[in-house]
Amino acid sequence: MADISSGGCQCGVVRYEIAGPIDDVALCHCRMCQKAHGAPAVAWLVVARKSFRLLKGTVASYRSSDNARREFCRDCGTPLFFVEASRPDDFDVALSTLDDPVNHGPDRHIWVESQMPWLKLADHLPQFLRETVKD
């Protein structure tokens, strides 16, 4: 039986399900994520489109760059997904929107060139100045 993870927005209008293991999580320090989430870094898990299912609700989106859009709950505004045109077979889910995110820590830091200088990284995870996709 496959691992099943579920999650959704803060108000509960949007719910989703991921079938399969979660083993690709990055902590992003880019300025777009910082601004979109109002946080110094955002944990994202990468999921294959075929493993993802929207159970209920409708997401709103906006184009955050020439190559990507961000999707969020149109009722409460919770940032949920990051969809990049150059990766059509997968997309990113905001880790903290999982119902049980505790056991899915990041395996690397990305976009550390934009890291807040007062945020000290002492976890010994690999750090990449820009984005890197896990092999």
Image (cartoon, rainbow, N blue to C red):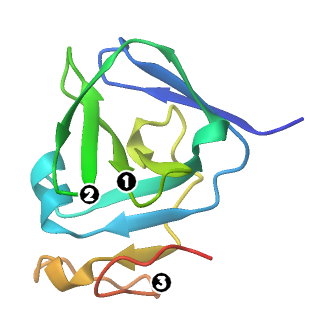
The CA distance from mark 1 to mark 3 is 27 Å
| Residue 125 numbered tag | 3
Q: Is residue 23 above or below residue 8?
A: below
Report crowding for label 1: few under 14, some 14 to 19, many 20 or more residues within 10 A (C-alpha): few
Residue located beneath label 2 in the image: 67
**Circle 3 SS class:** loop
At 25% from the left and 45% from the top, the residue drawn is: 69
Q: Is residue 25 left or right of residue 73?
A: right
**Rendered image quadrant of residue 71:** top left
Give whichever of discs 2 and 3 has the lower sequence position.
2
At 57% from the left and 49% from the top, the residue drawn is: 47
The CA distance from mark 2 to mark 3 is 27 Å
CB-based contact (under 8 Å), mark 2 and mark 1 = yes
At 65% from the left and 38% from the top, the residue drawn is: 50
Residue located beneath label 1 in the image: 85
Q: Is residue 40 above or below residue 71?
A: below
Q: Is residue 54 left or right of residue 27?
A: right
**Rendered image quadrant of residue 80:** top left
**Circle 2 SS class:** loop
